[in-house]
Amino acid sequence: MPAADPTIISQWQRRDRAVLWHPCTQMKDHETLPPVPLRRGRGVWLEDFGGRRYLDAISSWWVNLFGHAHPRINAAIQDQLQQLEHVLLAGFTHAPAIELAERLTALAPPGLTRCFYADSGSAAVEIALKMSFHYWRNRGRPQKCRFICLDNGYHGETLGALAVGGVPLYRETYAPLLMPVLVAPSPDCHHRAPGESWQEYSRRRVEPMAALLAEHAESVCAVIVEPLVQCAGHMRMYHPVYLSLLRELCNRHHVHLIADEIAVGFGRTGTLFACEQAEIAPDFLCLGKGLTGGYLPLSAVLTTEEIYQAFYDDYTTLKAFLHSHSYTGNPLACRAALTTLDIFEEEPVIERNRGLAEVMRYALAPLADHPHVAEVRQCGMIAAVEMVRDKATRQPYPWQERRGRRVYQYALERGALLRPLGDVVYFMPPYVITPEEIRFLAGVAAEGIDIATRE
């Protein structure tokens, strides 16, 4: 691997520090670990200005499905750029937005017939929350105005999405700004009893949710969950039976179910949509991130005809849904998304992913015996390795020690982008990764964990 050019890189880093404020970052950290200035990406690899390469093990925050600079997606965007770059989607429409909505509703779980676009995952969650609340208002039940969410869940960082999240790091600072919600315990199987199966534990964890719904259904409009994997919540995972039973509960109590598949959709969990594994259809399906293959910001909320009809009336009734984004249904983003769906349709992506997931499983299996690894868990193309101080008791390291950051720093030195969530080292790579590259990542992670867990 060629040595990086320190002069060019330091120039970009100096300019960065003078003007940029990076997301989810304590900027003072960049005094000792500056950001890596990149000039190009190809496939699973990113390249800095000195020619040094980094394997993108986390799909650039979970968005990239088929690698950087994919020739088909590049060509589609270039073609669309010559026709129509953007137009408002109020009073106007265009082929990419229509065709994408047709294809998404055809692929989605049954009954999801309407598509509303936005430009980020957080915005999609806001839309679903507002639609559910507004639906009950339009149906003459305005008292249904509360939401139930899961502890350790994450749905974005705008205020509505943050309110229905359960990760303390993200919500405690802004608590005075957030609407009150009801919080059910997570079905996260990391906490199951010794000898208890994922299915048994997830089934048992439905009971507190059932109690909340029984008590509060008259005031609750929707329950929101991340199906199967609580991604920002340290990649904690649960069994599909929880979703099946939750769907039954929501039906019984006349409460909407919002499935936030922004991170877990489009093949991440082993099926196109995670909800498929529970054989359920939510009332709202939030999609984003991988929707455009990681190229452009676009999200979508799919919902039912029955919900759509609650808003369909004469203008003077004032029942129309009140939400808009300037870049709603952007043609360039829709063309990228259409090409992403073409790749799913024309190539055996899900089947190939299952083979890659097995490679990942075998490559990471030895880490289960590491003296400072509590668990190696996996759901499809998402795998996580949780570091702890004490394996027997699962006592975590003090968060102030930032063991995960040591893994991140070591991985960069080895040419890999691993960005742990706290002390959880995770893998969510693009689907074009090879078995050899997976084994390389597993080796880097193992070495990094060895270094990070030294006292």
Image: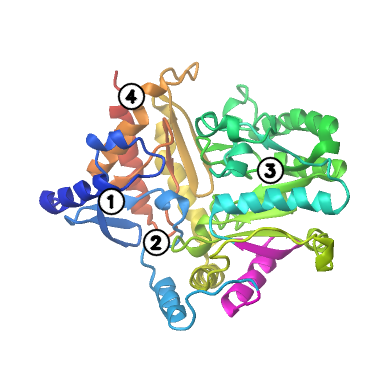
Q: Which mark is residue 453?
A: 4
Disc 2/disc 4 C-alpha distance (Å): 32 Å
Question: What percent of the width, then of the height, locates residue 109?
Answer: 71, 59
Question: What percent of the width, then of the height, locates residue 135?
Answer: 80, 53
Image side of residue 430 versus residue 30, left or right: right
Task: Write down the region rendered in magenta.
Answer: 91-117
Disc 4/disc 1 C-alpha distance (Å): 23 Å
Q: What amino acid type should be assigned to the residue bearing mark 1?
A: Tyr
Q: What amino acid type should be assigned to the residue bearing mark 3?
A: Ile
User: In the rendered image, which quarter contains the C terminus?
Assistant: top left
Q: Nearer the viewer, mark 2 or mark 3?
A: 3
Disc 3/disc 4 C-alpha distance (Å): 36 Å
Disc 2/disc 1 C-alpha distance (Å): 13 Å
Residue that mark 3 sits on = 224
Q: Is residue 116 magenta?
A: yes
Q: Which residue is drawn at 30% across and 46% down?
A: 416
Q: What amino acid type should be assigned to the residue bearing mark 4?
A: Thr
Q: Which of marks 2 and 3 is nearer the N terminus?
A: 2
